[in-house]
Image (tube, grey):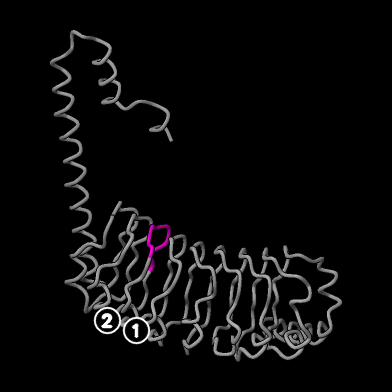
């Protein structure tokens, strides 16, 4: 914070030189000093990157957060056969290079707080991927090859630009947890029965209706729908009575919670809720 409030020595010198016409020769020295400083930063950055790559080569884990990267370093391509975990969060990467999908041993990929606008069409080649976290980017869709990620267990796409729940998620057999909160989702697929997730987080979207097929999701236990645009009529007796959902998080919608407690099927829901709670006690 202090750097934001006070001038650095170089900035103060620059100001002094501009104010005094008798220090013209110093301006040239300042420019040289500034260029030297920028060069030093680049050298240090490259040295930092080299160190991270060397560590990744030994451990299979590559952490490149806060590196001001605009693209994925090509050096990672040489490690494509032994990297298990890659974290590129807090950079300015908009696209993944074509060779990225050759990292066939990758199990955990994170790129949060970035500027990613799309994934490669052949992203599904990463068949060993188990955890994918791409929160706070600019994704509006998923590639058609996404269903090929048959080992994917955790998917987090919170804070992107999705307008609907991607249908590509409905055929992922190992999926456990899906976080699509803080998007702009207005509707869900009419047939949700293929979703294998145990927990689905749709908080802070713009959903107005729930398809009754959500009651047929075979493993869905937790459904988070806080701060959407749902009317109480969205929770039909079919959903309340026959689904396996044992935790509805629904506050902040277009109805009073008292109405939720009076729903046809609320008693059946509470039986599931209580039974699940006992398992954890």
Q: Give the range drawn in magenta.
A: 110-117
Circle 2 packing at 10 Å, graded few (<14), some (14-19), many (20+), is some
Q: Where in the figure is residue 62, as x and y percent of width and height? A: 29, 66
Residues under numbered marks 2 and 1 in contact, where contact means CB atoms less than 8 Å apart:
yes
Name the image quarter holding the N terminus.
Answer: top left
Q: Mark 1 points at which residue?
A: 128
Q: Which residue is drawn at 72% across and 62% down?
A: 252
Above or below, comparing residue 66 to residue 217 in the picture: above
> Is 125 positioned to the left or the right of 79 in the image?
right
Q: Which of 277 and 121 is in front in this view?
A: 121
Mark 1 Cα-neighbour bin, 10 Å: few <14, some 14–19, many ≥20: some
Residue at numbered disc 2: 104
Query: Depth check: 229 or 172 in front?
Result: 229
Residue at x-position 51% and y-position 65%? 158
Estimate the x, y position of residue 257 in percent, counting from the top left: 81, 68
Tell me if residue 263 is in the magenta stretch. Answer: no
Please provide percent x and percent y for residue 7.
Answer: 35, 25
Foreground residue among 87 and 150: 150
Determine which quarter of the picture holds residue 192.
Answer: bottom right
Above or below for 135 versus 7: below
Secondary structure beneath dot 2 equals loop
Does residue 84 appear to the left or right of 251 in the view shown?
left
Q: Tell me what residue is drawn at x 53 percent, y 71 percent.
A: 179
């Amino acid at each position: 914070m202090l750097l934001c409030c006070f001038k650095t020595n170089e900035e103060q010198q620059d100001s002094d030189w501009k104010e005094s016409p008798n220090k013209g020769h110093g301006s040239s020295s300042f420019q040289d000093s500034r260029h030297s400083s920028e060069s030093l930063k680049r050298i240090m950055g490259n040295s930092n990157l080299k160190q991270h790559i060397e560590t990744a080569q030994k451990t299979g884990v590559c952490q490149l957060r806060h590196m001001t990267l605009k693209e994925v370093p090509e050096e990672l391509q040489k490690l494509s056969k032994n990297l298990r975990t890659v974290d590129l969060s807090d950079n300015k990467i908009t696209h993944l290079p074509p060779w990225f999908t050759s990292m066939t041993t990758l199990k955990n990929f994170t790129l949060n707080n970035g500027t990613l606008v799309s994934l490669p069409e052949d992203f599904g080649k990463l068949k060993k991927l188990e955890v994918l976290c791409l929160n706070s980017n600019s994704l509006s869709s998923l590639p058609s090859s996404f269903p090929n990620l048959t080992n994917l267990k955790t998917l987090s796409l919170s804070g992107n630009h999705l307008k609907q729940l991607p249908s590509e998620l409905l055929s992922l057999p190992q999926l456990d947890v899906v976080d699509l909160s803080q998007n702009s989702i207005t509707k869900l697929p009419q047939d949700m029965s293929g979703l294998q997730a145990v927990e689905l987080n749709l908080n802070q979207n713009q959903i107005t209706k729930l398809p009754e097929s959500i009651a047929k999701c075979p493993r869905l236990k937790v459904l988070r729908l806080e701060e959407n645009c749902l009317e109480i009529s969205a929770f039909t007796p079919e959903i309340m009575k026959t689904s396996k959902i044992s935790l509805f998080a629904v506050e902040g919608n277009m109805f009073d919670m008292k109405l939720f407690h009076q729903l046809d099927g609320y008693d059946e829901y509470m039986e599931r809720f209580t039974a699940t709670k006992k398992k954890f006690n």
